[in-house]
Amino acid sequence: MSLQHFYLRDQVLADEEAAAFPLRLEADDAKHARVLRLAPGERIAVVDAAQDYFACEIVSFDDALPVVRIAQRFERADGGPAVELVQGLAKGDKMETVIRHATELGVAAFAPLACERSIVRLDARKGAAKAERWRAIAKSAAMQSGQLAVPDVREPAGLGETCALLETAAAVLVCWEEAPGTSRLDAALDRALGDGPVPEGARVAVVVGPEGGLTEREVDALMACNPRASLVSLGPSILRTETAGIVAPALVLYELERRARAGAR
């Protein structure tokens, strides 16, 4: 059975001098620990503020906070490139669905994009509130699926700000229903990343439009912002935005893992 995961914002476990010490969990995480009815002797997984990864054994509880001792420190494997999803703003709970399931897959960051054809319109205040909600969902999904980090979720941005964000990506894959059927995702990754090893932390951005899709003007801007940008097709079917927002990064993560395995042989 996998361990329950918790993330620390401002506590570095290597700095703790006592054999047993309280975990400084955020209030919602402390509440989650109580809901789980964790008991002394049980182990949890902890990623601390230095991004180090531990198994900790619960010794007792100090009010709401678990008192733990370090049972094991895990060596973190080379994570390879990080996949980021630029998701066109979608209505209802579609954004929540995408963020939840893409986090479970291992997507490292989300950049909501306000598109010309986005049905939902958010001002700065509503956009900030939505982003907080999406961050909570991403954190919950990361804890549930055992991710080694909680994804970064940005506030909704327009095309210009998003293009600036994509300028430094190692690859930009623009998913567009009008892309030629020969615009294969694996070939686009090969063109952008080459044959050699991809540095850890290199960003691979996947762009998915909203319900009405990306306009030609948006596609042109996204393609022009990075020389390693490519149009890609997800097949002959027209996918819903919430489906594409999960399928596209899943395919990219698979291809990156395949490349990593091939390079290790």
Image: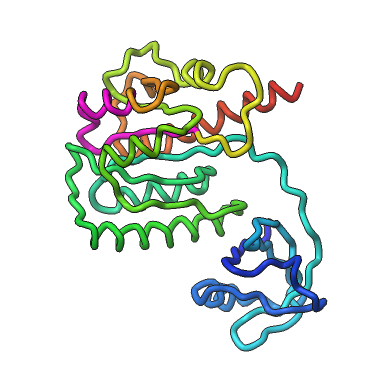
Residue at (54%, 44%) from the top-left corner? Answer: 106
Residue 208 belongs to the span the image colors magenta: yes
On screen, residue 246 above or below 13? above
User: Residue 247 falls in which quadrant of the image?
Assistant: top left
Which residue appears at 62% of the width and 62% of the height?
49
Residue 116 forms part of the magenta stretch = no
Q: How many marks?
A: 0
Residue 177 spot, x, y in % from top left: 28, 23
- Residue closer to the observer: 16 or 110: 16
Where residue 3 sits in the image (x, y, percent)?
68, 60
Magenta-tinted stretch: 204-223
Residue 150 in the image, given as x and y percentages of width and height? 53, 55
Image quarter where the C terminus lies is: top right
State the residue at coordinates (70%, 78%): 39
Q: Which residue is most to the top?
A: 182
Q: Is residue 151 left or right of residue 196?
A: left
The quarter of the rendered structure image containing the N terminus is: bottom right
Q: Is residue 180 above or below residue 94?
A: above
Residue 130, how many percent across, how many down? 30, 59
151 vs 128, left or right, is: right
Q: Residue at x 20, y 42 (%)?
A: 118
